[in-house]
Amino acid sequence: MKHTERIVILDFGGQTTQLIARRLREHGVYCEILPFNAKIEDIATQETRGVVMSGGPASVHAEGAPFPDPKLYDLGLPILGICYGMQLIGKHFGTPVVKGRSGEFGPAQVEYSESGHLLDGISLPMQVWMNHGDHLEEVRAPLRLMGRSAHGLVAAVCNLDTNAYGVQFNPEATHTPQGSALLRNFAFNICSCEGGWSMESFIEQAVADIRNSVGKQKVLCALSGGLDSAVTAMLLNRAIPGQVLCFYVDTGLGRLGEREQIVETFREHGHIELEVVDAQTKFYSELKGITEPELKRKTIGRLFIEVFQEEAARHKEVDFLAQGTLYPDVIESVSVKGPSATIKSHHNVGGLPDTLHLKLIEPLRELFKDEARNLGVLLGLPRAITHRHPFPGPGLAVRVLGEVTKERCDILRKADAIFMQELRDANWYEQTRQAFAVLLPVKSVGVMGDERTYESVCVLRAVNTDDFMTADFTRLPYELLGRSASRIINEVRGINRVAYDISTKPPATVEWE
Ligand code: XMP
């Protein structure tokens, strides 16, 4: 997609690099994250108005520390260095970066002596979030000291001749309440951005792009019931109505009533007739006897591909396959973070075989999740889809621990539906980011009436999280938990005990498998 302006964010491996991009976009400024060692010609394109260098875990003195191409400083583009990014600016312009004796971690107050328009409208002292070991000392020309933290350490510097700024804290963090305003100042006051990025403008451009690349050809679009694929389908349908073939694979691993709900939603809100591929038998029979979580995921990934291949073979008239890939998936494939150990193989990211012979179309690949959600609202999707909790690609298979059978999926579906209904009725559904029930392969003894029971244990889980990299359990009211547990035990045959999962991520994960 063509953009008239953008800010480039160089990723030095900081935990919050994506947040910088999200904050800028919230101000209507389009920005892109590139790896720290991006080529100068990829950074200094015609539409680039400025560069942000993110934080990162390294020390500028460490062997192998990441540095940008030094020509970056000669481009005449404004630069904002954040944390490690500021230390890079210090080192480049000859101000010593020293190993701190203690560093600053957590909340701090910053007083400023110079603003350079970065701080227009910001009240002082500024409450900020610090997270650094090294720091700058004895600021030397051409850098100028802009502010110090209450601990007396250099908190911000600038080089007004080259428009380079550095802040030692994280303006993107929610714990820096005026940080978003600072980023806005950088974009508008210093980079002279105009800020035309909005989901309305995105729709216009995306529709034109889709028409351009698809022409009169046809697109196959698989719906999962989740937000990303739903928005993709709606956008395609807006751009090329009559050329999109949508299908939904019923794996038998979906939530209660999911299939019917999706078909209805698309008929009603998108005027799209969905083809339902009933693959329940295939999934249940292939999953028979499998208890090992990774093998389950791999099997489901393989089955999805097989079903896709069969669908593609049935629709010979189709040239494109649409996917709801979002920006975070695209960035992760270029980030500085080295290969990390596979904790869970997320099968629905980038795993389609070349043998499909279909061209891939990914109209959301520049969007963050919250942008995709706003887009969905604009395209007319109901709140039941746009504000639905995320649901993993392998579905209930990773929540039915042990062997996945239709019978156990049915038990879990009923329990999960009760929990969701209780959350909604108590107004808690949208106050937690994700909630679900899990069925354990463990039986416990209970008593119902005068009868001894020996049945499965169900676990309820609800989490609060910003980005799903870390998560805390939601402090749901006991009354709500109590009501859910009592209804599940009374209404769902096969469960006689309910527990609430109070683990955080890390060390646990959100899903149980
Ligand atoms: P974990 O369990 O890794 O989950 O802490 C983090 C988030 O990712 C979701 N999840 C998946 N999503 N395909 C998906 O699309 C998958 O294979 C998958 N596995 C986990 C999980 O529901 C949570 O929101």
Image (cartoon, grey):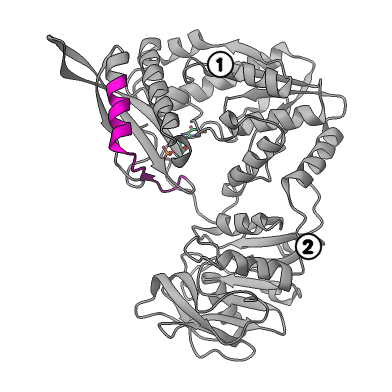
State the image quarter where residue 9 is shown. Answer: bottom right
Cβ atoms under marks 1 and 2 closer than 8 Å:
no
Residue 181 x/y as whole percent = 61, 67
State the image quarter where residue 220 is shown. Answer: top right
Q: Is residue 177 visible?
A: yes
Is the residue 438 above or below the residue 376 in the image? above
Question: Horizontal placement of 10 versus 389: left or right?
Answer: right
Q: Which residue is mark 2?
A: 194
Q: Residue at x 56, y 21 (%)?
A: 304
Q: Which mark is residue 259?
A: 1
Question: Looking at the image, is mark 1 or mark 2 earlier in the sequence?
Answer: 2
- Packing grade of label 2 (10 A; few <14, some 14-19, many >=20) is some
> 18 or 305: nearer the eye?
18
Residue 219 x/y as whole percent = 76, 24
Disc 1 element: helix
Q: In the image, is residue 20 part of the stretch drawn in magenta?
A: no
Q: Which residues are magenta?
A: 468-487
Residue 39 x/y as whole percent = 70, 62
Tally the numbered discs. Answer: 2
Q: In the image, is residue 472 part of the stretch drawn in magenta?
A: yes
State the image quarter where residue 261 is shown. Answer: top right
Is the residue 208 above or below the residue 37 in the image? above
On-image quarter of the C terminus: top left
> 348 or 385: nearer the eye?
385
Is the residue 306 above or below the residue 320 in the image? above
Three-letter amino acid code at the position of disc 1: Arg
Spatial CA span between label 1 and label 2: 44 Å
- Packing grade of label 1 (10 A; few <14, some 14-19, many >=20) is some
